Amino acid sequence: MLLTTVTVVLVYALSTTAESTTYLIGVTAAIIAGIAFNLGMVIQKLAVKKTSRDIGLMHQLVRSPLWLSGFALQFIVGMPLNMLAQSKIGPAIIPGLMAIGLIVLTIGAVRLAGESLDIGDIAGILLVIVAVTLFGFSRLSVDMQSLNLWDPAFLLRISLFTVTVAALSLFCHFAQKKNVRMRGILRTLDAGLLLSQSNLWLGILMVFLAKWGIGMFTPLDLLPVIVASGIVFAGSMLGIAETQRAFQFGEASKLVPIQYVPVQILPIAAYFIVFRLSPSNPISLPLALGGIVLVLFGAVLLGRRQKV
């Protein structure tokens, strides 16, 4: 199923215009990055299972060679590929394409971590996989290099979007302290919001790094580079920490797909709200919206059995 989905998306990418090579590179990088990130999560979940709740979780994990190997897989393999995808197709559909890694997550969770899946769980995962195909077909790529990132209206939109996502993240963080039964789900949603924030600003950071690469970087550009780098780093680190804490209260094969809800929906929202773009293909929007609907249904199926 994994190979079939990847093949369909890549063949579609190759069958279009002269820009298909760039699109193909971006799609391929995003898919492989998704596999690396999810395999890393399986390894991290194994490490979390060996920890004690009597000691600080992250204090134990940073001393665990097993957890560090999963972390390294994500940041040595997954992060560079994610950055490559960002530079080729922008942030809109990268999380959707990376969801293909759920196959790796599912197999790993069942075979390595001893987690169980029922028919509803499998249906939920299949819905997410179909959503990946729809996201790939939508071709909602963002030409980041053509954007005027110093436009006041754009700066206002991205600032409001960033503050809104941060507020949602804070809500989940405080809500999980009061709702023990939903703690695993709220923590993984918080992680998804943090990682979405990081992914959006990684796209902004890549634009300025590209300007530096071609000698067009100005001293004024240093400020957004510092801001973007800070958000990317903080969002990534806090998102990873929240993911590990969520693993203490639920199964990885259920929690990670739920995390994909904000991770996949927010970039599509940013495509229209922050970047103010309109798809050139009339079927792009229905395909993207269809992908979002399938992700939501899949997440509901995967989250319905969550227990503390």
Image: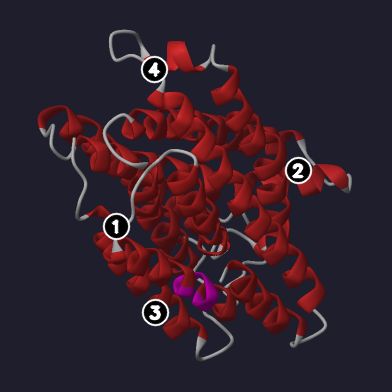
Whether residue 231 is visible: no
Looking at marks 2 and 1 on the same chain, the residue that comes earlier in the sequence is marked by: 2
Name the residue type under label 3: Gly
Q: Is residue 302 left or right of residue 75?
A: left
Pick out the residue farthest to the right. Answer: 215
Label 4 close to label 1 by CB (< 8 Å): no
What is the distance, in whole Å, between disc 2 and disc 3 at their CAs?
34 Å
Label 3 close to label 1 by CB (< 8 Å): no
What is the distance, in whole Å, between disc 4 and disc 1 at their CAs?
25 Å
Label 2 close to label 1 by CB (< 8 Å): no
Q: Is residue 277 left or right of residue 308?
A: right
Name the residue type under label 1: Leu
Magenta span main SS: helix
**Residue beneath disc 3:** 290
Q: Nearer the viewer, mark 2 or mark 1?
A: 1
Q: Is residue 238 above or below residue 89?
A: above
Q: Is residue 178 left or right of residue 304?
A: left
At 45% across and 69% down in the image, what residue appears? 272
Circle 4: element type = loop
What is the distance, in whole Å, between disc 2 and disc 1 at their CAs?
38 Å
Whether residue 31 is visible: yes
Q: Position of residue 256 (x, y in %)?
A: 40, 48
Q: Nearer the viewer, mark 2 or mark 3?
A: 3
**Residue beneath disc 1:** 302
Q: Position of residue 169 (x, y in %)?
A: 31, 39
Looking at marks 2 and 3 on the same chain, the residue that comes earlier in the sequence is marked by: 2
